[in-house]
Image: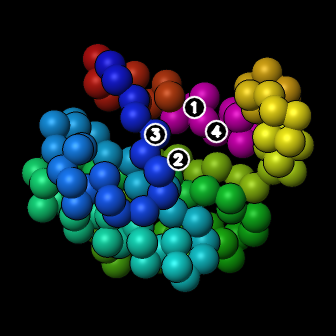
Amino acid sequence: MIISDMEAGLEHLSRSTTRASDVMLVVAEPYYRSLETAGRVKRMAAELGIPKIYAIANKVRTPADAQAVQTFCEKHGLDILATVPHDEKLIAASQIPQAPLDFYPESAAVLAVVGLAEKLRAMLN
């Protein structure tokens, strides 16, 4: 299994560097520009023939944030595979710098990402 964390944006899709991917995770934050970009990423990934495309709701602070991402994803045919809450500890970890998993393994955000990894492992094995 190879996991590639691509830079935010669309360039890696326009260059077809992700064409051979089995799964594309589209990170969507509850903000207009992020959601619009997520929609474009989903369309481009589908055009490349990537068979499984899922959303990750990221930096979710409130039920309204979660609902905004959910509504957008339903409208654009994206299933949300995980929701990662906003967590100030992740900001602190990046300032040290230290991996969030090492800095604060009990963080709700870290636990959400660990849960996502377990889901992906189960899906792909």
Disc 2 to disc 4, C-alpha distance: 7 Å
Residue 5, labelled with which disc?
3
> With 83 as the anchor, is 85 left or right in this view?
right
Disc 1 to disc 4, C-alpha distance: 5 Å
Residue at horizontal 60 percent and vertical 36 percent from the top: 113
Answer whether residue 31 is magenta in the image: no
Q: Which residue is mark 2?
A: 82
Q: Are marks 1 and 4 in contact (CB under 8 Å)?
A: yes
Earlier residue among tags 2 and 4: 2
Q: Which residue is mark 4?
A: 112
| Residue extent of the magenta highlight | 108-116
Q: Secondary structure at mark 4?
A: helix
Disc 1 to disc 3, C-alpha distance: 17 Å
Number of marks present in the image shown: 4
Residue nearer the viewer, 27 or 83: 27
Residue 28 in the image, given as x and y percentages of width and height: 51, 63
Say what amino acid the circle numbered 2 marks: Ala
